Amino acid sequence: MTAIRLSVYRYQPDSEPSASNAPKSDSESDPRRPKPYMQTFEVQAQPGMMLREALLAIKEQDETFAFRHSCGEGVCGSDGVNANGTNCLACITPIADLKQPIQVRPLPGRPVIRDLVVDMTQFYEQYRAVDPYLIRKDPLPEQEIRQSPADRDKLDGLYECILCGCCSTACPSFWWNPDKFHGPAALLQSWRFLADSRDQATDERLDALEGPYKLFRCHSIMNCVEVCPKGLNPTQAIGRIKELMLEQSV
């Protein structure tokens, strides 16, 4: 079987760097704090092998290696990484599609906790900020809230988001203003509920997006579209929100 070479990002703040695996910190920083470095591994290729499987093979060689993963089927969204400069889900990214040596780094723009594990707190805070749930003012019916097939079709391409963070962490505006700009994932969900005929909080949702940062930091460079593992289009959703804002203001 063919060996695959992978160079993975290593950062373990709770362990001391050694000459064999990491450079010492420079004199201007805390000498007790290890610095990030890249470490190369070789794993045996398997037919149909995905990047997640290669990372698991690395973990068998070095049990201190850390990355998030769960379902392995592109559903949970937990194993987002940056492979050869592009954000992706490791579990559905074929090794055969990646040029070797494969460079695997954490999702960009997020604080690194350990190796490929990043802190997604701000990402989820922006998601919660758009109230990602139906808001009703009328009394709830005894059964379901009815919706026509045509209105239901408007939600296709919106509800499928798995919150992997690949889009927002590929967005320069989110890198620069993660505390102010909601980011592609959150704004996609904002439009998902604005477009839902059952929701009754359109004015409140639009008012909450007013200002120069929450919505309008998007410059439509479409990095988010390129990396979405579900083939969704946050840029289009953001454009629809802007159009609705304009309609409501006239």
Image (cartoon, rainbow, N blue to C red):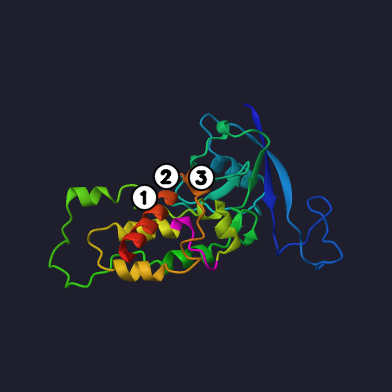
Q: Are marks 1 and 2 in contact (CB under 8 Å)?
A: yes
Q: Name the residue carrying label 2.
A: 230
Q: Name the residue carrying label 3.
A: 227
Image coords of residue 144 (percent x, y):
16, 61
Q: Is residue 69 above or below residue 6?
A: below
Image coords of residue 70 (percent x, y):
48, 51
The residue located at (63%, 41%) in the rendering is 84
Mark 3: which amino acid?
Val
Q: Nearer the viewer, mark 3 or mark 1?
A: 3
* Dominant secondary structure, magenta: loop
Q: Name the residue carrying label 1.
A: 160
Tag 2, which secondary structure? loop
Marked residue nearer the N-terminal end (3 or 1): 1
Mark 1: which amino acid?
Glu
The residue located at (28%, 65%) in the rendering is 134
The residue at the far front in this view is 250
In the picture, the quarter occupied by the C terminus is: bottom left
